[in-house]
Image (tube, helix red, strand yellow):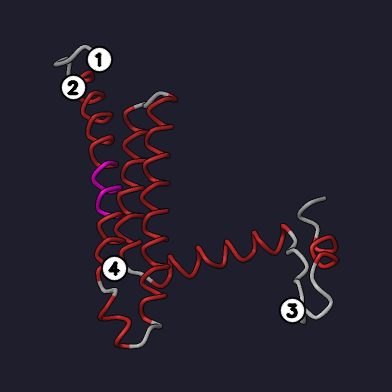
Amino acid sequence: MPGDWWEAKSKTSEGDSRRLKKPRKWADKFREAFRGMKLGVRGHSSFFVHFFFAALAIAAALALGCDRTEWCLLIGCIGMVMTAELFNSAIETLFHGLDDETKNRIHGCLDIAAGAVLATGLTAAIVGTLIFGNRLLTILHVWEG
């Protein structure tokens, strides 16, 4: 197997003192990923707002009887916002570990990451408005969707 660590080790030069690490098990990868999600969610208060609006969207979808396509769009939007927020949290965590000189040089990274969360949040809000607006107008017999 080309990615096998034994094969890669055998191709290193005799004088190369670097040790190649054994690949991690899938269970370890998932455990670390879930730990990362927990750290991202617990460490940043903006997740409360995202969870609130996600719960509100799910409740509205249940109450308005959304179809499968609408559910897919809503869950996809919720996932995108949460993912963007996790990336933003990771960048903030890295940023806070830097020295002051480096922070001054790359301060725009935080603004860009926050902008990505804003862009996904606005996109999700537009999708939600289209879905729920159509459902409400159809229920009120104002629109034949």
Q: Quadrant of residue 78?
A: top left
Residue 66: x and y in percent read 37, 27
State if disc 2 and disc 1 touch (CB < 8 Å): yes
Which amino acid type is shown beneath numbered disc 2? Leu
Residue 132: x and y in percent read 26, 31
Residue neighbourhood size for the residue with mark 3, other residues' Cα within 10 Å, grouped as few (<14), some (14–19), many (≥20): few
Which amino acid type is shown beneath numbered disc 3? Arg
Q: Earlier in the sequence, mark 2 or mark 4?
A: 4
Which residue does the numbered mark 2 point to in the structure image?
A: 137
Q: Distance between the Cα atoms at labels 3 and 4?
A: 35 Å
Q: What element does badge 1 sit on?
A: loop
Residue neighbourhood size for the residue with mark 2, other residues' Cα within 10 Å, grouped as few (<14), some (14–19), many (≥20): few
State if disc 2 and disc 3 touch (CB < 8 Å): no
Q: Distance between the Cα atoms at labels 3 and 2?
A: 66 Å
Residue 91 shown left or right of residue 128 in the figure: right
Which residue does the numbered mark 1 point to in the structure image?
A: 145
Which amino acid type is shown beneath numbered disc 4? Leu
Which amino acid type is shown beneath numbered disc 1? Gly
Q: Earlier in the sequence, mark 4 or mark 1?
A: 4
How many callouts does the rendering have? 4
Q: Please name the predominant secondary structure of the magenta segment in the image.
A: helix
Residue 105 shown left or right of residue 142 in the figure: right
- The residue drawn where x is 36% and y is 48% is 55
- The residue drawn where x is 29% and y is 42% is 124
Vertical order, 41 against 121 (above or below): below
Q: What element does badge 2 sit on?
A: helix
